[in-house]
Image (cartoon, rainbow, N blue to C red):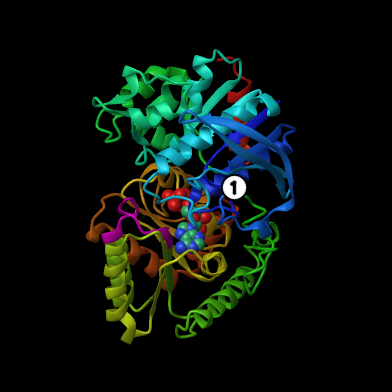
Amino acid sequence: MKVLHLAAELAPIAKIGGLADVTLGLPLELGKKGLDTCVLIPKYDVIDKKGLKGLKKLSSFKVLFDNQWHKNTLWQAHIGSLKVWLIEEHTQKRYFRRKAIYGCSDDMERFLYFCACSYALFERYKPDVVHMHDWHTAAIAPMLSFAKSPIQTIFTIHNPAYQGICTKALFKKLNTLKSTKEWSCGLTKINLLKAGIIYSDFVTTVSPRFARDMLSKKSTWGLFALLKKKGAHYSGILNGIDYHTWDPEKDPYIKARFNVGKITRIFGRAKTAFAKIKQKNKLDLQKTLHLESNAKVPLIACITRLVEQKGLGLIEHAIEYTLKKGGQFVLLGSRASKETERDFEELKKQLKPTNRAHLQFHHNEEIAHKIFAGSDMFIIPSLFEPCGITQMIAMRFGTIPIVRNTGGLADSVFDLKDSSKKPSKRNGFTFSKPTKASIEEAIDRALLCWEKRPTEWGRLVNNALKAPYDWEKSAEDYYKIYKKKP
Ligand code: ADP
């Protein structure tokens, strides 16, 4: 079976957030199951070519867009065993040569152009299944449907906060399509995410809980009627993480490496073995970030895009509260608006004299790995979270998540006191209300357990390390969908 994934991001070469991790991890796992998989992305000028093996030109091809023919080059490379195709455009508008993946004023047009190019390549790749990720690639669904193509289509919604609303006039640049009523948005606009939902054979989102949330009439995304109509052709599959990328035994950035399987096997007998490893990584992190080197101070971290969804006010409060309780806090934030960055810079200035907080605002892969391995706890107070993968990565390094009980966080983190779960499944701390009081209560419980109940903490760490969040099961669920007849 040949499966072609279409996306705007791919780790590690073009990564903004979790979407990039998924478009690497899922196809890699599908490849292990014997599927012929390939990921197709734009060849952005910001691509980190070091991550690509055997980059070579495959061919040139032309695409009709906005009533003009445009020349493109198709490139091929590998990331590990994964085949990657990259489209280099040679347009006057330099769509993918903007020193950015997103954030241009004409993003809609850029990704519609990418759809036009992708469509032109189906003839060459001959996929059995086309798997589209998020609005950037959603226009492919109606294109294939209108052409009565036999290719099976699956559309995954990673974040419905971004729906791809564009003008009908812009959409007409695709030439092959007319817009339709069902996905119109007022008189002059259309909604690409809706088009993806309507015209794909199957629609998924990235956790079962979030799939249910989007089906609720109360959901703010305005998609429930369309999703309901999909019936059994709509489901939630929890994301996994790529255990090769996030492997504490081979991680090039961390001080003390360890084999997760070995550690968890001997955990009962040798709790201190892991504690020593954690201590080394923590001291290394503290040294790197110029914090006081002290293993006895609890260290809470957060790595996130700094956008409203992630609970900005709650993150700020968690920082202040952790310091008030005598702990250290590390924030690695990315993609903040100017205003948000100003607020956090202000907080950073205020906290400087304490020397117990480190806040930095850009994407930094190396520091991210050190944080996952070196902190004691990892906080995610999202207002909503389709899946979230940092909680899974943190657990893989024996770092305990403190999360808001929503979406995929609720499907992957189970509170120490959650009696509906077996004690061996409990792997963190959760809170429900997006309020200061709730987050304080969760931080208090976590700090108390860390400081005063080492045996209970040890069990929690062992459960977190053992939590099965690789891609194995989720890839199997996607494979089952690929095999279904539309
Ligand atoms: P989202 O996709 O909404 O941004 P996820 O939790 O699904 O959130 O995925 C975030 C991914 O991006 C993780 O791999 C995380 O480590 C990474 N990430 C986020 N911010 C940064 C940053 N500032 N530096 C390095 N990696 C980051």
Left or right position of 469 against 101:
right
Q: Is residue 142 visible?
A: yes
> Viewer-proximal residue, 342 or 359?
342
Q: Residue at x 59, y 77 (%)?
A: 280
- List x then y, in percent, for residue 158: 45, 40
Would you say 135 lies left or right of 372 here?
left
- How far from the left and from the top, in percent, is residue 471? 61, 42
Q: Quadrant of the C terminus?
A: top right
Residue 137 percent across, percent down from the top left: 49, 34
Q: Which residue is mark 1?
A: 43
* Residue 474: quadrant of the picture: top right
Quadrant holding the N terminus: top right
- Range covered by the magenta-colored residues: 303-313
Q: Nearer the viewer, residue 36 or 368?
A: 36
Task: Please tell me whether mark 1 sits on a helix, a strand or a loop.
Answer: loop
- Residue 353: x and y in percent read 32, 87
Q: Nearer the viewer, residue 64 or 425?
A: 64
- Measured along the vertical axis of the image, is residue 313 above or below residue 209? below
Indicate whether residue 311 is drawn in magenta. Answer: yes
Q: In the displayed structure, does residue 52 sit left or right of residue 459?
A: right
